[in-house]
Amino acid sequence: MSVPESESAQGSTIQTIDELREYLYKGLQLEHATLPPYLTALYSLHPGKNSDAWHVIRVVAVEEMLHLTLVANVLNAVGGTPDLTKPGFVPNYPTRLPCGPDYFEVHLRPFSPEALDTFLKIEKPAQAGSEEDRFVPVDWAALGLASDGATPPPEKLAELEESGTVLGLVPGEPTQRFLSIGEFYEEIMRGINQLEDQARKAGTTIFTGDPARQVTPEYFYSGGGDVIKVTGRDTAVAALTLVAEQGEGLYGGIFDSQDELAHYYRFQQLEMERYYQKGDHPGEPSGPDLNVDWDAVYPVKPDIKLADLVADPEILAAADEFNQFYATFLTSINLAYNGQPDLLLKAVWEMFRMRDSMNRLVRNPLTGHPGANAGPTFEL
């Protein structure tokens, strides 16, 4: 699914291959940033309860791993190097994502109406009505990072990104963010077309990466779409289109091009307590009832930090162990994206073995925090 040269002539803010690689790195960061909130909500569910919610969140989490892999394939194809171990790659929760018409904080929370509301905001479809509407000004005062609303100096911006406090500032345009995740990926696809058009006119290509670094379908199975091996413009655009479609239903569809329900509508089923089925319109699911028990959940303390656990040495040790486990998990994925794709099969399996480590946290009440249980801190 390539964009013809006439359409790519709309232009992109992406002017160089280095800028394209920076955008794709931010895509990796964005896709991963949803995993800790989704996993925290998933493993806060009481065993044997909320099977519908468990299924919905689990499917979305696995598909986020697929998206991470697709973006890594595109980055490798254009000669970049995925790095999931870079400082600031894992957000400092609560964090704010780089996309959306309104700022909202993304928290580590147990499954709850508040958590679901955040998930819907993350995946919310929003297609710009005009070119001017694709970008939204960054309100630094709203972020609490500049009392006068002025853009912080470059060294401060770099510090904020490295700390994971602010994600995905537009490369070269820190005063702007995107209306939606779909528009973010639209910009990357435009950049790919623009740079590839220029390269072909010069008799070259931007797709100079080592084909051996591609993760191919045999190394990842999710049941929610296939990995696409990126070999050129068409497969790169197809991979990124699938990411956007599967997340928010790009271009207004409930189902993506591989006939999977988009994440926004998967989560909306929990809100409306009814499943979507083929032929339904957005906001009008007509399938079977979906049962949600908001009380069958461990009361994990939102945005818990290691500092909250000092009164409970055993829980603190378990939280440290989980963080080490998660760091190893990310390292395995990073190696998979850097020439050892067979490690991805193990990493996906490890993601669901996290339940054991999570259980040692979410089932334990905290000293000094009445009514609150421990939880993962994701402080790496």
Image (cartoon, rainbow, N blue to C red):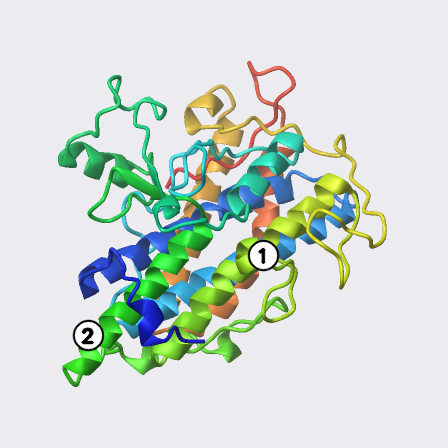
Q: Would you say 368 lies left or right of 186 here?
A: right
Please say if 377 is above or below 189: above
The number of discs equals 2
Res. 358 visible in picture = yes
Image coordinates of residue 4 in percent, x first then y, are 36, 76
Quarter location, residue 118 = top right
Image coordinates of residue 163 in percent, x first then y, are 28, 36
Mark 1 burial class by Cα count in 10 Å: few <14, some 14-19, many 20+: some
Q: Quadrant of the C terminus?
A: top left
The residue lying toward the viewer, choosing from 191 and 321, is 191
Q: Amino acid at mark 1?
A: Gly
Res. 351 visible in picture = no
Question: Residue under circle 2?
Answer: 198
Please say if 327 is above or below 40: below
Sequence order check, earlier mark of 2 and 1:
2
Image coordinates of residue 215 in percent, x first then y, are 42, 74
Q: Residue at x 76, y 30 (%)?
A: 295
Quarter location, residue 201 = bottom left
Q: Secondary structure at mark 1?
A: helix
Q: Secondary structure at mark 2?
A: helix
Q: Would you say 87 lies left or right of 198 here?
A: right
Q: In the image as oriented, which residue stretches furthest toward the right?
A: 288
Marks 2/1: CA–CA distance = 31 Å
The residue lying toward the viewer, choosing from 3 and 103, is 3
The residue lying toward the viewer, choosing from 136 and 256, is 136
Residue 197's label in the rendered image is none
Mark 2 burial class by Cα count in 10 Å: few <14, some 14-19, many 20+: some
Q: In the image as oriented, which residue stretches furthest toward the bottom?
A: 203
Question: Residue under circle 1?
Answer: 252
Q: Quadrant of the N terminus?
A: bottom left
Q: Amino acid at mark 2?
A: Gln
